[in-house]
Amino acid sequence: MGRGERFRVVVLGARFGGLAVVHRLRRLMGDRVTLTVVDQRATAVFRPALVEAMARPPVFVRSLRIPLDRAVGRAGTFLNDRAVAIDAHRRLVHLASRRPLPYDVLFWATGADAAWSVVEGLSPATGGLCEDFLARHAAAANATWTGGRILFVAGPYRADPRATPQPASACECPLYEAAFLFDQALRRHGRRDHTEVVVVSPAGVVGEALGPRGRARLQDLLDTRRIRVVTGARYVRVEPGRLVLADGALKAERMIWIPPYAGSDLARRSGLDDGYGWVPTTGHGRHRDWPDIYAVGDLAARLPKTAHAAVTQARAAVDHWVRTVRGQSPPAPWHPASVTLLDTGDGRALLAYGPGPVGDAREHVVHARWAAWVKDLLAWLYVRSDGRLPFTP
């Protein structure tokens, strides 16, 4: 890296992975980079807390938002726009409403696209929690709930069938959390006996992201709270008032979905995917064919979607690029860890941690009040610090 040399850095996406890239670059490179951050949303949100919609009024979402022009701040320029194509040959990002952005290095953190159309009849109107507008609608609908069956449904995960490990469900654990929170809210208002709460998942086991200890503890909690789980679900279609499965149908007055995920349309359009919509990367997040592109978060991980994975991947990717331009030896590659922090709605949270990509026999499991305080603290820190988390200083 020559004296005074500046690098044009473009960051696509400003959620957990994207903001972690911004803060890490600011710390390591300062004014040595000209940074541009692009996101089609004007605000970021602490998404793990959106499940609280099942127990709180719609306005709670406001406390989870970060204005992205403020978050990018002194580090660079924020563009509220959408990337429509990446020209890796010419190192250009084509935007929906602006001229193409040139880059020396691109950090890609847009996440996987919600593939609602994978299941016939499914759409955001069915109900969900994975975006702030969906969480607001869910919270508003709770006010008119009078009873019946509610389904919390995890969409399938579509990727290269040869890739391992590979979850069957797109993002299962937040639905258990949402079910616990709704159960507790119903109990507070004396309406629990009029409601059947059911979690539906394509996974073959309860809590597939957890290890044996975590699954056993989760199952105990589900049994105690009378929450039923349907595993191994194969979805045929969604109809008004029922979910049709390959082996039958479940009637329901209401559904809450985590949608299917099938990679990135931007990766497909740009010819940068692995043939299944996902970005192929090295252990440092570097694109296997294009060394000036890094992908972080669930766009590349093919693991259960977690903030921890996205943020730690961002750190590994930035550190690798910085060492590369400085002519230094590369850092250790990213090592995935299994981290689950699940609010059980009773003032406690289930915390499961394992050193591998999914839970195994080495997993540590705690169900305690302090674990719930940790989750609340992380949300507070994330918003107050404009997207920084303790494990990505």
Image (cartoon, rainbow, N blue to C red):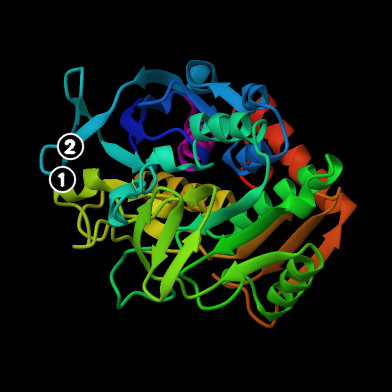
- In magenta segment, residue 180: no
Q: Quadrant of residue 364?
A: bottom right
**Rendering coords of residue 151 (x, y %):** 56, 55
Question: Where is mark 1, residue-wise?
Answer: 270
Q: Residue at x 29, y 54 (%)?
A: 120
- Circle on res. 85: 2
Compare residues 150 and 275 and report the one nearer the observer. Answer: 150
Callout 1: few (<14), some (14-19), or many (20+) C-alpha neighbours within 10 Å? some
The mark that comes first in sequence, 2 or 1, is 2
User: Badges 2 and 1: C-beta atoms under 8 Å apart?
Assistant: yes
Q: Which residues are magenta?
A: 17-30
Which SS class for mark 1? helix
Eyeballing the image, is 301 above or below 79?
Answer: below
Callout 2: few (<14), some (14-19), or many (20+) C-alpha neighbours within 10 Å? many
Compare residues 379 and 346 and report the one nearer the observer. Answer: 346
Which residue type carries mark 1?
Ser
**Rendering coords of residue 233 (x, y %):** 45, 71
Q: Residue at x 63, y 21 (%)?
A: 62
